[in-house]
Amino acid sequence: MKTYSTGGPKLSTGFLLPFILQMAFIAFQLPCYAQTKGNISGKVVDPQGIPIEYVSVGLLYEDGKMVKGALSDSTGKFTFSAVPDGKYLVKVTGVSYHPLTTQSFVISVENRILDLGLLKLKEDSKLLNAVVISAQKKLVEQTIDKTVINVENSILSEGNTALELLERAPGVKVGEDGQISLKGRSGVLVMINGKSTYLSPKELSTLLKGTNSSSISKIEIMSNPSAKYDAAGNGGIINIQMKKNMKTGLNGSVSLNGGASRNARYGSALSLNYRNDKVNVYGSYDYGYRGETEYLDFVRRFYDNGNAGGIASRASYQDTETDEPLHTNNFRLGLDYELDSSNTIGLLINGNVGKYTHDSKTGNRLISGDGTIISRMATTNYDQQNWKNLTYNVNYLHKFKKEGRTFSADADFASNSFTSNLNLKTTTLPSTDGQAGITTNRRGYIPAVTDVYLAKIDYADPLTKTIKLESGLKSSIIQSDNNLRYDVLNNGNWEYDSNGSNHFKYKEQIHAGYFNINKEFKGFSVQAGLRGEYTRTQGHQITTDSLLIRSYFQLFPSVFINKPIGGNHQIQAAYSRRIERPDYGDLNPFRVFRDPLLFYQGNPFLKPELINTFQLSHSFKGKYTTAINYNQTTDVITWLSGQIDSLNTTFESPQNLNRLINYGISFTASTTFIEWWNGTHFANIFRNEYKGNVQNNTFNNNTTSFSFNSQNSFKAGKGYTMELSGFYYSGSVYGISTYKGSYAISTGVQKNILKDKGNIKLMVNDIFQSNRYREQTKYQNIDMYTNKRPDSRRIMLSLSYRFGNQDISKKDRKTGSEEIQNRVKGGG
């Protein structure tokens, strides 16, 4: 056996201390001539002490004049920052509760930080039996550290998949093969319910296509996460939060949707929930069918001198039509049980089972420089893929007597299995009359199994009124087995293809620990965190009996400094260090054929990439956020194209480039132009500079790009609501390739029915069918152009109905182990 053992990336944190000191100096110096101000906080709870989320909290002068307002968060907490000296009151109002007004209090030099403690609201029995006025959360909510998209409030989410929802998210771009980037940075960590999926990008793309919007509550986008989160994800983190009912008694919902793009689409969903003082039992199931047809044009030019340029000696023109029917089944079953007021245990099972078929017909013409047809080929590619993702979770939560001090523990096991049955048939057609055609047949069977084992504990403790500590430990073990077998048809008999077949096993261990300390000073706050991760990977190429082992320890610091200025401004400086490890799909060197002239191949010698990211942001009135960011990635993993001229064949393989520099400025605005028109708008200007060595030649590919995203909601009266959204991406670069711009505009309308317990929605996505992927690569001997036209224009009609008790009087608890399955392909 050939064994290779290498260390990981070198630890380089020498620049960190000067940076922290510089950021702290900046924070201290920010308009210190402004008057030092105070902070007021508290927590809103019901008579049983259960936190009440999203109720109105007003800060008033002693004479009753309004100063500013806020909403309690998901834990019932609220905060007023940068409050000038003076006498104040706090008034809390919520639907079905009596208003509560505190006694007056004073903010002064001696009392800058004030915690009002628990503010208990009493239920109003009259209002409980009256008509309930519902206050719906905004479609897009923007804070200084994250963007939240409330999917369940969106008309345009109906009948979509999770991947299609991400296409419309501010700052997010989804590539032609499902690669996800954020503000121009690839390597985004996608989490489901806070758990990494440990899937390859292709598998993750399939999983997201198989996750229906009807089961999604919201999407959280974090471009600069803290040390509490996994260090993976150079481009940041996107967390997809699934729905979980929080209402007492027996209740549920049912929904149906149907429509068409180039093919039919339809689906249905059912959720049930029962909750009392001790027990919460919940479950959901949804089914979706997505018919889709896409078109691909692929042009390649070949040059005798080996360099792209001048007159091509021959050119290949390829056109492909692909039918891609997708059947998905998602289910979720859980139990939470309160042992007492301090201890809660929970069990959870998530499942995602589906079938995807890739049925394509490809025509290829190879033409000489003088226009003579050299060859013609017709290829059919039928690939049926099946997957099953099951995740089992046991969780425990302990609440100490001290308010805010908690301990949680989680254990997870996730089983992810995928199979691909491929049949590739190519007929070389006669270029002139009288010639006979030649047919070749190849079939492939690709079973892949990935198991994930996870254990995690977290501890949170507000040490004082101004200092909060978070810490935790986490261990994960991944085992992946991918056994590819190819057979070729020879004289009517299937024969094993030893050159194309491959068996690859991959094991990965990550053991991590972290701590975060948040300290509030007079006039600003600092959060500093440090995460340490030990990684050991082992890739065993059984076919060639070679073993590649890597082990390394890395530190991932993060620093956030927040400073309010006056009553309307807030500035944040942030730094974090992150890592992107190659997944087993990148490392597995086997070949997967799209057709006889195009294949993909992994690289077992890939190194993990490391990124240092800096951001300075400013928020005005909590509605307008401007952010300047600079990021530098070393050993950046990039899929690059190669070409075998003698065989007229193109391939793609991942390589480590020297460096990627990304910097830019973004602007987010939450607007209310008119009382009935709310909107969130995102604009981003960024520059990407790729530098590296490809085929023994140094290259530098760079460009400045622009993106814009706008989400608008209109209240039309009589229960009608309308939405209009659109996005635009200018040209961009990736590795040695250049991408053309694209845009899409979508709209929809909703009507509440059945006494507001139901609604009916009609939406049209990508009205002008303008969302397409156009790629140009021109480097050395490579000259090719790709134009992919997905099935993006569709019309959908949906109906949903809520039944049972709709009273929310008990707070849902999120399990602590929600960060694990993203590079394997599985559940959340």
Image (tube, rainbow, N blue to C red):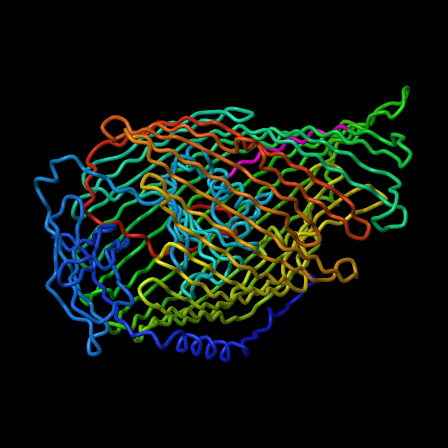
Q: Position of residue 106 (x, y in %)?
A: 16, 70
In the displayed structure, does residue 697 sit left or right of residue 173?
A: right
Q: How many marks?
A: 0
Observer-nearest residue: 189 or 476? 189
Percent x, y of residue 413: 41, 51
Classify residue 31 by image quadrant: bottom left
Q: Which residues are magenta?
A: 378-387
In which quadrant is the N terminus drawn? bottom right
Up-down relation of residue 592 to residue 324 (above or below): below
Q: Where in the figure is residue 180, as x and y percent of width and height? A: 55, 49
Main SS, magenta residues: strand
Horizontally, is 357 left or right of 61 in the view?
right
What's the residue at 58%, 51% (across, down)?
706
Q: Nearer the viewer, residue 72 or 593?
A: 72
In the image, what residue occupies the spot 58% across and 57% down? 686
Query: At x 49% / y 65%, what residue is drawn?
Result: 615
* Residue ID at (45%, 53%): 668
Residue 28, magenta (yes or no): no
Q: Position of residue 537 (x, y in %)?
A: 57, 62
Residue nearest the viewer, comparing 177 with 34: 34
